[in-house]
Amino acid sequence: MAEILPQDIALDAASRLLLAGEPVAIPTETVYGLAADATSGEAVARIYEAKGRPRFNPLIVHVADVAMAERFAEFSTLARRLAGMFWPGPLTMVLPHRAGSGIHPLVRAGLDTIAVRCPEGFGRDVVGRIGRPLAAPSANVSGRVTATTAQAVNAALGDRIRLVVDGGPTRVGLESTIVKVTDEGLVLLRPGGVAAEDIEAAAGMPLQRDAKDVQAPGMLASHYAPRARIRLNVTDVKPSEALLAFGPDRASGAEKAAEMRNLSPSGDLRQAAANLFSYLSALDAANAETIAVEPVPRHGLGEAINDRLARAAAPRETGRQEI
Ligand code: TXA
Ligand code: MG
């Protein structure tokens, strides 16, 4: 089982583990989060590993204040007003991602938007202490009920992580409200800890909730689809194809590839997960018609990697895909 430390004495231990790239379960005012350094791909991959998530959903980036959030996202006047009203607190805003933010691509799962929130309490304190943003999904095992006490977190994840910070039962008890802020207005993506009516009153405009605009959590339309065709489980590379390789052994014809990236030369799935989105877009930018992908094992993080690759390879008549 993980060590459980009361929050008033946990700041040093949690900071040390987070800076070393380890995930730590932390209390927020909504639910417990499984936090990791959002600037490190391997640290973020460990979140997925611990949660056993079979696919890469984009994660919320937790910040200490608006100034920090503005390093990662483009804030409109409306977004600034909402942050001023509701932060710190249970409001997450989905905003355009700021290029060169330093947030690892795995956090956004390839999207060109980013979800940011400033939590109350320990989560905010630890971000302030380490001076880095934290990616943190709810601290439950994928598909199981969300944890609102340290004991529930420990029961679910205790054998997979080293530290659970105990802040007592969370104040809100359900996740943050997620609102997408665009030039056209506000879209409610997930109801949560801030009432939609309160956001509407602060914004002076209604929230859009019509089905075609609302993307259910975990079922988001992806704006990221490679331009190139994707050919999976390739054992023979054709000349002029770009190659996304995995492991120490190469498919035949690999030397003729127009461009190559190896997700993990040693065959480490955590490293492969961390590299997946940036390597796919690097190969896409090389302008090959097809990206050939070597087989990636399906165990552990390999399940989520294969899920994302299959979605990237799927026909996309609508121009949108689930991720
Ligand atoms: O209260 C909360 O929000 C908690 C605490 C720990 O902060 N976190 C949480 O995270 O609920 P998670 O990963 O369980 O849910 C985050 C949701 C997911 O449904 C994800 O699809 C959505 O946020 N999301 C993240 N980035 C997004 C983006 N760029 N666009 C749209 N939705 C996004
Ligand atoms: Mg969740």
Image (spheres, rainbow, N blue to C red):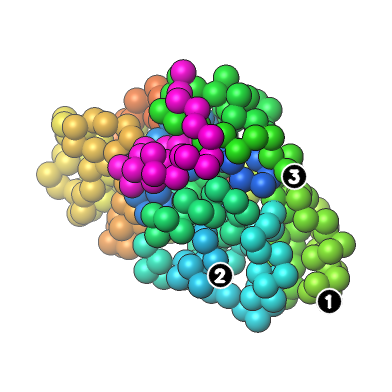
Q: Which residues are magenta?
A: 1-25
Label 3 within 8 A of ligand 1 by Cβ = yes
180 over 11 or under it: above or below: below
Left or right: residue 174 compared with residue 247: right
Q: CA distance from mark 1 to mark 2?
A: 21 Å
Helix, strand or loop at mark 2? helix
- Residue 175: percent from the left, percent from the top? 70, 45
Residue at which label 1 appears: 204
Q: Earlier in the sequence, mark 1 or mark 2?
A: 2
Q: CA distance from mark 2 to mark 3?
A: 22 Å
Q: Quadrant of the C terminus?
A: top right
* Residue 320 in sight: no
The amino acid at mark 2 is Val
The amino acid at mark 1 is Gly
Helix, strand or loop at mark 3? loop
Residue at which label 2 appears: 66
Left or right: residue 256 compared with residue 146: left
Which of label 3 and label 1 is nearer to you? 3
For the point 52% across and 42% down, the residue is 8
- Observer-nearest residue: 180 or 192? 192
- Residue 146: percent from the left, percent from the top? 66, 32
